[in-house]
Amino acid sequence: MNIPRQLNVAIIGCGVIAPAHIEGFQHFPSVKVVELCDLDKSKADALALRYGIDSVSTSYHTTVARRDVDCVAICTDHASHAPIAIAALNAGKHVLCEKPLGESEQAVQAMVSAAQSNPDLVASGVLQHRFDAVHQALRLAIQEGLLGRPLLLQGRLLCYRSHDYYLNTPWRGKWASEGGSLLMNQAIHFVDILDWLGGGFSEITAAYCNLLHQGIIETEDSAGFTGYFKKWCPRFFHRNVIQQCGLGTFFLRRRLRRSG
């Protein structure tokens, strides 16, 4: 794998998460953000002015075609992740893609195939909480048997999203463009950490529903699942309740059926 001495990065998508990527890259002297790309040029221009970046674009095709771009960071809506990543990989660029990798299993599989076809390139998703000190320490303790035989991993997420959160961003809350809401957006890091700590799920029983945003979104705002892990099944039992709540707290006491 040939990593250049200075890594030139382009940010594709100039929404709410883009500043975190720009600031992260700017911490490293050997990394330079050379271009910002967004369909809305005013967003790219505003970030370019804020962070002192010289070049902006409104087409990811133009961005990935630049010979001096070594890597792209994809910070766009979910449904565009796979096509942008595939175009970048086929253009010889390393790829860092925001979560989730895609809005559907088919999209993710297409992205993985493109990465496998370009083995000299790095292609990675953003699941940064695996590197939190507490998670690193907990995983090491589990792997080395310092906690004895694990019996249970449990997680719970309670958070709030208003109607306006979805209404002000048209691609959110739709199966075709977001691929899911709570599980794809807010809770994905928690699900990933549980899967990572447990060594991968072998079996899951799950349910989801829309409790608080009916008529606003197609997707889920509440979910729960029970799973077994590959390494410890059937000895290792995991139960996780994940919820997104609005005006009050609703605890899942029984299996939820899909609704609305």
Image (cartoon, rainbow, N blue to C red):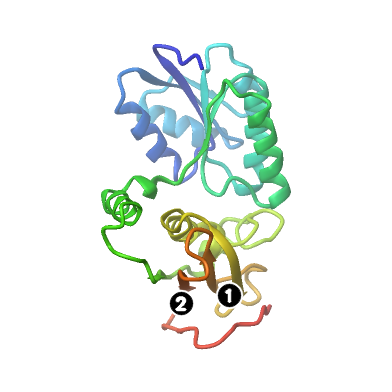
For this rendering, which residue is in front, 226 or 51? 226
Label of residue 213 in the image: 1
How many marks can you see? 2
SS under mark 2 = loop
Name which of mark 1 and mark 2 comes first in the sequence: 1
Q: Residue at x 49, y 58 (%)?
A: 231
Task: Tell me the quarter of the image containing the C terminus.
Answer: bottom right
Kindly identify the amino acid type of the residue bearing the numbered disc 2: Gly
In the rendered view, does 241 fall on the left or right side of 178? left
Q: Residue at x 61, y 48 (%)?
A: 78
Kindly identify the amino acid type of the residue bearing the numbered disc 1: His
SS under mark 1 = loop
Q: Position of residue 77 (x, y in %)?
A: 59, 46
In the rendered view, does 140 fall on the left or right side of 13? left
Residue at numbered disc 2: 246
Q: Residue at x 62, y 26 (%)?
A: 88
| Residue 63 vertical placement versus 108 (above, below) | above
| Residue 131 vertical placement versus 61 (above, below) | below
Q: Examine the image and state in which quarter residue 153 appears.
A: bottom left
Q: Position of residue 191 (x, y in %)?
A: 48, 60
Q: Position of residue 25 (x, y in %)?
A: 37, 29
In the rendered view, does 41 fall on the left or right side of 194? right
Q: Residue at x 47, y 23 (%)?
A: 9
